[in-house]
Image (cartoon, coloured by chain):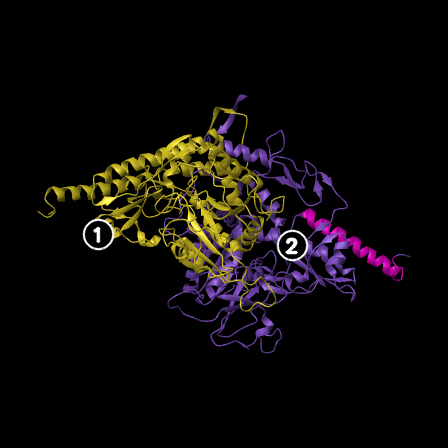
Chain colours: A purple, B yellow
Amino acid sequence: NLYFSVVDDRGLSWSRGAAEEAEAVAAISCSGHGRAYLDGVISGGGGLPVCECNTCYGGSDCSQFSPSCSADADGGNPLFLEPFWRKRAAASALVVSGWHRMGYSFPDGTSISPELERHVRRLHAAVGNAVTEGRFIVFGAGSTQLLNAAVHALSPDVPSTASTGGGGGGIPAGVVATAPFYPIYELQTEYFASVDFQYQGDTSLWVAGGGNSTSEEKNVPDGKTIIEFVTSPNNPDGKLNEAVLKGPNFKAIYDRAYFWPHFTPIPAADDGELKIFTLSKLTGHAGSRFGWAIVKDEKVYNKMLMYMQLNTMGVSRDTQLRALKLLKTVMAEGGGRTIFDFGYQTMKARWEKLRTVVSRSKRFSLQDVSSHYCVFSGRVRESSPAYGWLKCEREEESDCYGVLKAAGIIGRGGSVFYATDRNVRLSLIKTRDDFDLLVDKLQKLISAEQEEEEEGGDGNG
Amino acid sequence: NLYFSVVDDRGLSWSRGAAEEAEAVAAISCSGHGRAYLDGVISGGGGLPVCECNTCYGGSDCSQFSPSCSADADGGNPLFLEPFWRKRAAASALVVSGWHRMGYSFPDGTSISPELERHVRRLHAAVGNAVTEGRFIVFGAGSTQLLNAAVHALSPDVPSTASTGGGGGGIPAGVVATAPFYPIYELQTEYFASVDFQYQGDTSLWVAGGGNSTSEEKNVPDGKTIIEFVTSPNNPDGKLNEAVLKGPNFKAIYDRAYFWPHFTPIPAADDGELKIFTLSKLTGHAGSRFGWAIVKDEKVYNKMLMYMQLNTMGVSRDTQLRALKLLKTVMAEGGGRTIFDFGYQTMKARWEKLRTVVSRSKRFSLQDVSSHYCVFSGRVRESSPAYGWLKCEREEESDCYGVLKAAGIIGRGGSVFYATDRNVRLSLIKTRDDFDLLVDKLQKLISAEQEEEEEGGDGNG
């Protein structure tokens, strides 16, 4: 089928086939409730990948909705940003040649792309959320890998019993966090059970007052290091936490996964010793597994580099190439303005809907969110956290997770975060379908509550 | 600049710009002694990435050769396969959309691409180097991550001193290998100093005879597990090693990075409990950081999955997409025939050159290589290992690494592999430029030796 056509003079050669394939897959219709991927499972006859549908949608083109299906507000899949990238298909597309970076190292001998590092620094300068001048940057496979690398790097070297010869000695570091907190901190610390560090429970154990106030150390043996994970904004409740423990034996790892204008005003740039960021909640590319740590102390930096080398020999160069393309796209539009506008407007609209629904209820409440001056937007803003931290107010409903589950809403129980199941985390960052269904089910649950009340508390009457 | 042209009717839309950009970068001339990458550092004016030159080549287009520069035969960069991929530019190109797999999971809830796993199984079936039927497959960031995941999974859970409550108890596993061996085994085991395992030196410590023969255990305390790393073909010397330790307390991790027809005849499929493969020495994409383990025991498999989850939340979905494209390209041509033909012919030709040069010398020798029937090629073949394991034969030249270095050849000293520096590993899998320069420098060194001998051993005469 050849024909004459007006084209520009930049004909494509080797990349044409791959481009056609990608466009054919992107053109597969999944009814707006799913998407097909290049590496999806191939369907029977056509040789094309199948549609992967949003929760509660099915059928070969995702057009079939299952009304009885539960709303899934469990995971942290950041698909609220997917429409942003679909609209920027041309700007964010990437062509990888078959011979792209086959070797281990960049020209400077490291496994860290200098161009990508430059773009990470540019991004922080534009957003104003982290000081990077004079700091070192380490890449990792998402923040996940960097969290444990940081624990290793901040811990003393404890000689294992089998080791011969000298070595610094010392006792294992304790690793702590303040509930409610992201469970990976404990799970990771315990799974990678090291002679150099141990998980040691809640920060309150080490605070003189025993409470939440910033405090000097108590009960810390001589020479023992305590490493505190600080998630800020916090997962699950969105609070802009600060380190609880302060003093010469305490070291903080700031998990800044959610410290972006989508979710929070940026009160000031994080100027701390060790902070960890990730692409997952910034551009929404959780699947890419790309994160970075910004480190002040060169010794800690070198230990983290060694961890990355011995654990995975650095981050996949394919991932670094993709992350670069994504950050370039982000920065090309108003120095990041458009993605943060999109993210913030989306999250703000979701919070307004959620709050409207929950405000009609006495049975449920949401966390308070704070307002701060935001250096990025130049005005005072309210937070729009990634998760609702819903509470069941009725004394008898201590299993709030179960209450929601019975109403067709799958959240994540507070006990997962070392709180109680009186709270449930509701993910607000998933697809629009997931969010709409969540609101719909909540609305029904709360309407039923209101009917009960109108009928004098006898819902069966 | 518009003109009329014959084109087919498949016009491109969103992928065109990225395709043009990639082709423009691929068209940058680096004189055949380097290459430009899409994520290379941008040169001053033009906005295009700079050429990254092969060792000893420089200048903006890599055309300047530095004759005084040392041949670099140190690292394991598998760039001998780069020409294969350059010739298959169209078949191996990949277009990644901006919204590709943003979420954490594949539709089955895992972080492992079912299509990629299927292609891994197809590949092993075609090559005949590993039994995959009824086995589990775990993906990792190169073999590097999987090696430590396997050690974790095979070790008992030892309660750390701070742990409260029950737990299986037990004593830490010992991790061993037989010199000369790949140093990462020891470095990794020691860096991730765990309460569950410890590095405990050479296998010979645990063999009744103390020698190399397969043997029953000795000195193994009750309940102690010994984990043996077996590299086969071995790095550095290319030997088809078998586990030295056999008995109920011993578990082997087979590192099969080099078990491909490029480097060795395939005597039989590996039918063992736990074997680890990587893309690095198969397709040459070391920078992609992709490997897989084939595991028999479901419990071990589940522990490795947990490691991957808590360490990095699985392998980057971008990397998995790229690996799939590469394996598809490999399998599309004669079920892998062409890449292994290319790899084997390249390695064989390099070995012939190297052997011809070294055979003229009494001062140096190379390792013997074995011949076996190869189930893949259907005939008896000689090995063509990734590395030459060169020995200095003169008694006084115990620092063979230093002897070569003085002659402008950078190898990797035997002591790095827990042997002595009387041996030096010479990498034969790098670029053609690297190999040619290595042969050139060796030739000069050996010619000087012959001149010395002809002059009665007095080189200054």
Front residue of B60/A96: it is: A96
Q: Which residues are magenta?
A: A432-459
Label 2: state its secondary structure. helix
Place of residue B226 in the rendered image (x, y in percent of width and height, measured from the top left): 47, 56
Front residue of A352/B274: it is: B274
Q: Single out the residue that lies furthest toward the left.
A: B461
Q: Quadrant of the N terminus of chain B?
A: top left
Q: Are marks 1 and 2 in contact (CB under 8 Å)?
A: no
Q: Which residue is mark 2?
A: A347
Front residue of B139/B4: it is: B139
Chain for mark 1? B
Gap between marks 1 and 2, in whole Å?
70 Å
Whether the magenta-drawn stretch holds residue A447 is answered as yes
Task: Give, as a three-letter code, the residue at label 1.
Answer: Glu
Mark drawn on residue B397: 1
B411 left or right of B98 in image: left
The answer to whether residue A279 shows anywhere in this view is no
> Mark 1, mark 2: which one is toward the viewer?
1
Chain for mark 2? A
A441 left or right of B167 in image: right
The answer to whether residue A450 shows anywhere in this view is yes
Place of residue B405 in the rendered image (x, y in percent of width and height, measured from the top left): 25, 50
Place of residue B80 in the rendered image (x, y in percent of width and height, measured from the top left): 36, 39
Place of residue A20 in the rendered image (x, y in percent of width and height, measured from the top left): 54, 32
